């Protein structure tokens, strides 16, 4: 079995640490990690670890990027506080942005359903990203918002609303939720790489994703000149997409037992 190097901020990242323990591996402190000491794959969490991700791309070195899962962390009767139980793990990228055929049982276990496409909405909702993905791609958030609005105005006269991401997860999960916003006369959602695009598709609202990679790329469009002609994927494609995303995210328990690593090695080796 190939060694994986688990890099944890101050050795205190609970998810990296949990994953490492499940694999029987030690944890490296991100503050003292020596990239050049080994060529083994790196496991890291947090988009601001970009210097190592870019270095891996340059060197052709494998890495596994962890972040919040696509679904399963929303407020439900079994998860009333919307805790982060599910975590996406992506090999050599930030998002699972390609559609790969996966078994259906894992996705079906979530009980997720796609609402029919809502084609009656009027306004365009821009889900503003936070600063971290902007910094990763060396972009300025305010400039991106301004350019996005200006581009939209060149191709539509629809009202445009910008939704700022609440910094407190508890607030955005329980109050003025994205689901409520999408249900308020929305025609289409525009975002950078926000997980809001995934939720939007489940809510029956078409999406435009403008980042180099986004989980919703296979079921949305990236060209704002097509804002008046959104993409409405078939139910079969949506189901296949849901199966693909479900295969790339893992529960806390799967991190702890090592099942997450076994699944990742089965999928990508």
Image (cartoon, rainbow, N blue to C red):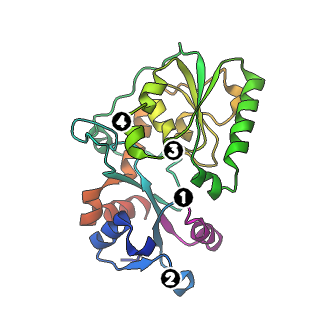
User: Which stretch did the figure color magenta?
Assistant: 47-64
For disc 4, the marked residue is: 174
Q: Residues within 10 Å of mark 2 (few under 14, many from 20)?
A: few
User: Where is residue 187 drawn, in percent x and y?
Assistant: 56, 20
Nearer the observer, disc 3 or disc 2? 2
- Label 2: which residue? 32
Q: Residue furthest right?
A: 154
Closer to the chain start, of discs 3 and 2, is 2
Q: Is residue 187 magenta?
A: no
Q: Is residue 145 left or right of residue 96?
A: right
Q: CA distance from mark 3 to mark 1?
A: 11 Å
At a point 32% along the width and 33% down the height, the residue shown is 112
Please name whichever residue, 54 or 137, is drawn nearer the observer in this view of the structure: 137
N-terminal of the pair, mark 1 or mark 2, is 2
Residue 35 % position (x, y):
55, 80
How much space separates mark 4 and mark 2, taking CA atoms? 38 Å
- Which residue is rendered at x = 30% and y = 67% of the image? 18
Q: Nearer the viewer, residue 229 or 46?
A: 46
Callouts 3 and 1 close, C-beta under 8 Å: no
Report the disc number at residue 45. none
Residue 117 relative to residue 127: left or right: left
């Amino acid at each position: 079995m190939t060694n994986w190097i688990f890099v944890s901020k101050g050795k205190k990242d609970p998810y990296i640490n949990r994953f490492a323990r499940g694999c029987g591996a030690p944890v490296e402190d991100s503050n003292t990690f020596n990239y050049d000491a080994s060529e083994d794959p790196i496991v890291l969490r947090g988009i601001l670890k970009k210097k190592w991700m870019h270095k891996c791309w340059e060197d052709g070195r494998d890495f596994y990027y962890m972040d919040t899962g696509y679904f399963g962390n929303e407020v439900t009767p079994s998860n009333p506080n919307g805790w982060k139980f599910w975590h996406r793990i992506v090999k050599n990228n930030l998002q699972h942005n390609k559609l790969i055929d996966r078994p259906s049982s894992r996705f079906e276990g979530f009980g997720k359903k796609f609402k029919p496409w809502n084609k009656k909405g009027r306004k365009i909702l821009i889900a503003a990203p936070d600063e971290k993905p902007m910094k990763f791609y060396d972009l300025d958030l305010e400039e991106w918002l301004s350019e996005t609005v200006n581009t939209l105005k060149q191709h539509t006269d629809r009202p445009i609303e910008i939704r700022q991401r609440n910094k407190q997860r508890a607030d955005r999960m329980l109050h003025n939720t994205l689901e409520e916003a999408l249900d308020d006369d929305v025609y289409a959602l525009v975002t950078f790489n926000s997980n809001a695009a995934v939720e939007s598709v489940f809510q029956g609202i078409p999406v435009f994703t403008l980042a180099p990679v986004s989980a919703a790329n296979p079921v949305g469009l990236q060209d704002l000149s097509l804002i008046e002609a959104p993409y409405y994927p078939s139910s079969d494609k949506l189901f296949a997409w849901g199966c693909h995303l479900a295969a790339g995210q893992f529960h806390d328990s799967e991190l702890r037992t090592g099942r997450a690593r076994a699944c990742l090695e089965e999928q990508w080796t």
